[in-house]
Amino acid sequence: MRVGLFGGTFNPIHLGHLRSAEEIRETFSLDRIFFVPAAQPPHKQGSDLAAATDRLTMVELAIAGNPLFSASAVELERSGTSYSVDTIKYFLTTLQPAHLSFIVGLDAFLEIHTWKDYWRIPELCDLIVTSRPGIAAPPPEQLIPVALRTTFWYDSAVHVYRHSSGHILVSYDIAGLHISATTIREKVRRNESIRYLVPSEVEAYMREHALYQQEELSR
């Protein structure tokens, strides 16, 4: 089984996330994509982060109609800070046999040297590095962070990086919707419409639980 792991805060999940996941699933012939909300992300702290249980529930509501999408509470059930390497190891153990692809945004990937045991990640799975709509990925020779360059080589015949472990890294430009979770939270605080930015079930849940309504816009 070919599985994609799509992690993030999903604060909140929106149609851009869903469209991106669908594009990636189709392009890379993945059998399933797991959305993995982070409980305590080490690089995103702040009082505008909704409770992990709320973010997980919104993910579940958003993907309910797609049998190829699943939500995972693994990072909520694990105590302490959420680390990608631990999540990847969990799925490798529980989904055997499975081929994993870790989906990561370009901005986050370029900071991978700050992650826990970052050098282990390409040893464990493939990497799909995505760029936001309208922002193209850098040239191949500039894509790999300095900390990882000695372990990858570029295969120009098929336009992928190959790792010494046998796993690959591929860059993918998202053609989907350019929607920002930050913009959504700001619109909620201003009492502006977020219709067609998030699934209607997510919008209703946010309204019912008064999410993102109390924070100051200056944050």
Image (tube, grey):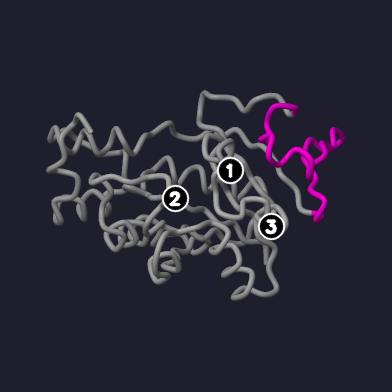
Q: Is residue 115 above or below residue 36?
A: above
Which amino acid type corresponds to the residue marked 1 in the rendered image? Ile
Q: Is residue 90 above or below residue 107?
A: below
Q: Residues within 10 Å of mark 1 (few under 14, many from 20)?
A: many
Residue 68 belongs to magenta span: no
Residue at image position (36%, 55%) is 62
Mark 1 — residue?
112
Q: Nearer the viewer, residue 151 or 6?
A: 151
SS state under label 3: loop
In the image: residue 181, left or right of residue 153: left
The picture places residue 74, in percent across and down from the top left corner, at: 45, 68
Q: Nearer the viewer, residue 211 or 217?
A: 217
Residue 155 belongs to magenta span: yes
Whole-Å distance between the Cαs marked 1 and 3? 15 Å
Which amino acid type corresponds to the residue marked 2 in the rendered image? Gly
Magenta residues?
141-166
